[in-house]
Image (cartoon, rainbow, N blue to C red):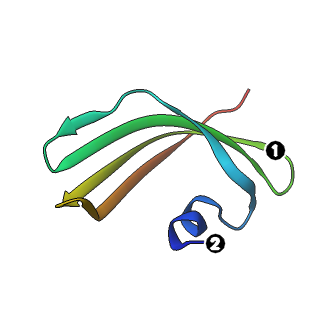
Amino acid sequence: MSHFDSQIESEGFQGSPQLTVDRIVDAGETIVVPHVGETRRDDGSAFRFAACDILTFTGDLISRVESYVVPLRTE
């Protein structure tokens, strides 16, 4: 498992979340990706969230990743 995968698949959760990308905003060296996601906790309960990832590039490589996650109520 890569370092990136280990950040997506974390303890307390089952596998990778299902993500739905709202849009991709290209601002030159920075890409902004707002999205929503859903996964299952180890106890089987649903975990829904809204998130935004900000990727900063240096040349062709990602040099910085910022992620903001807001849990959503599950009904």
Circle 2 sits in a helix, a strand or a loop, which is it?
loop
Tally of marks: 2
- Dot 2 surroundings within 10 Å: few (below 14), some, or many (20 or more)? few
To which quarter of the image does residue 10 belong? bottom right
Kindly identify which numbered label has been placed on residue 17. none
The vertical placement of 9 against 24, above or below, is: below
Question: Where residue 59 sits: x, y (%)?
Answer: 17, 61
To which quarter of the image does residue 63 belong? bottom left
CA gap, disc 2 and disc 1? 25 Å
- Sequence order check: which comes first, mark 2 or mark 1? 2
Question: Where residue 49 sits: x, y (%)?
Answer: 56, 40
Q: Quadrant of the N terminus?
A: bottom right
Which mark's residue is nearer the viewer, 2 or 1?
2
For image coordinates 58% across by 59% down, the residue present is 8
Q: Which residue is mark 2?
A: 1
Q: Are marks 2 and 1 in contact (CB under 8 Å)?
A: no
Q: Quadrant of the C terminus?
A: top right
For image coordinates 31% across by 50% down, the residue present is 54
> 58 or 66: nearer the eye?
58
To which quarter of the image does residue 31 belong? top left
For image coordinates 74% across by 55% down, the residue present is 15
Question: Where residue 22 sits: x, y (%)?
Answer: 43, 27
Q: Which residue is mark 1?
A: 45
Question: Where residue 3 sits: x, y (%)?
Answer: 52, 73
Circle 1 sits in a helix, a strand or a loop, which is it?
loop
The disc labelled 1 sits on which kind of residue? Ser
The disc labelled 2 sits on which kind of residue? Met
The vertical placement of 38 against 9, above or below, is: above
